[in-house]
Amino acid sequence: MDTVHPVGTLSGPLPMRVEGDRAYGPGIYDMKGGNSIAFSALVHLHATGQRPKLPVTVMMIPDEEIGSPFSRPYIEVEAKKHAIVLVVEPSGDFGRVTIARHGIARYNVKTTGVPAHAGAYHSKGRSAIREMARQILAIEAMTDYDRNVTLNVGIIHGGTHENMVPLSCEAIVYCLVPLPEHEAEVRAKLLALTAVDPDVKLEVSPGLYRPSFVKSPAIQRLYDHTAKLAHEIGYPVKGERVAGGGSDGNFTGALGVPTLDGLGVLGDGPHTHQEYLLVSCLVPRTKLLMRLFETLDASFGSR
């Protein structure tokens, strides 16, 4: 559930273990810990004869880390039936709650050259990899840190043999686009790319996209209520956070359904072999979710 770690990580580089206040394990912070405390909060309410003020639907999304290509329509249909969305992605910066998220766009780039023997007939070839290298430099040069717009070529595949001028090369571009206008700008630039070598074919096509969502008055009210409950519990949140990484909250927030994200566990090292959560956060963060279930009513929602 929402982890990038391959099978074998648990028995290899990241075994489950507890060292002091840290519990290590693949996906324990991002975001199995959040899934666990969400269920625990509901189980506790049920066990003590209590119920949430509003009906609660729990969705477990197994393809979130690859952009939720299968789950997205189901998430959006379900969100429209509900007044509020609470996302148990991990807390940011050891205690912040996410009130907005930037958009995430992916693009597929393909170059097709002219194959040739790399020794005897090298001059007759047109390298797809060389063209891709030039395009990567152009694509990553579109990054604008001042506006928090970043483009990263994170995957590239090309060629078949070292003694052959490569016929084809493919790459995937991961773009952080804080606002819809940034996404439109990046899209226009990428789709306008042309091959440097006229004998090489260049194709750019849009891939998966997570729209951005921004803080609304309803989200601010949700956050303020959550911060008050956390203070009463004695484990305060550390403020608001606008997150760069995407989550399924992007979809629900973009629909206009009040969405509060980052309600999961505290820890660090997501997607690494040092991933851990803080054991000391488990009970208070579970209590916070339980209190949210007990107190949130339809007045906090969008409908």
Image (cartoon, helix red, strand yellow):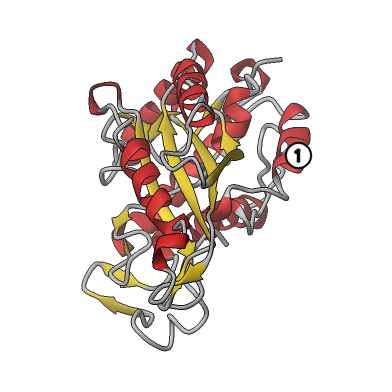
Dot 1 corresponds to which residue?
73
Q: Quadrant of residue 230?
A: top left
- Can residue 268 be seen? yes
- Image point (41%, 39%), residue name: 196
Tell me: residue 158, above or below residue 140: below
Residues 48 and 74: in front is 74
Left or right of residue 82: residue 14: left
Name the amino acid, label 1: Pro
Determine if residue 232 is in view. Answer: no
Q: Residue at x 42, y 71 (%)?
A: 26
Count residues near mark 1 (Cα–Cα under 10 Å), then give few for <14, some for 14-19, many for 20+.
few
Where residue 135 appears, as percent x and y from the top left, is 39, 42
Query: In the image, is 36 to the left or to the right of 263?
Result: right
Front residue of 173 and 113:
113
Give the x, y percent position of residue 125: 47, 61
Judged left or right of residue 75, residue 39 is left
* Image location of residue 18, percent across then percent down: 30, 77
Disc 1, SS:
helix
Q: Which residue is at a point 57% across and 62% down the rendered structure image?
A: 1
Q: Nearer the viewer, residue 236 or 66?
A: 66
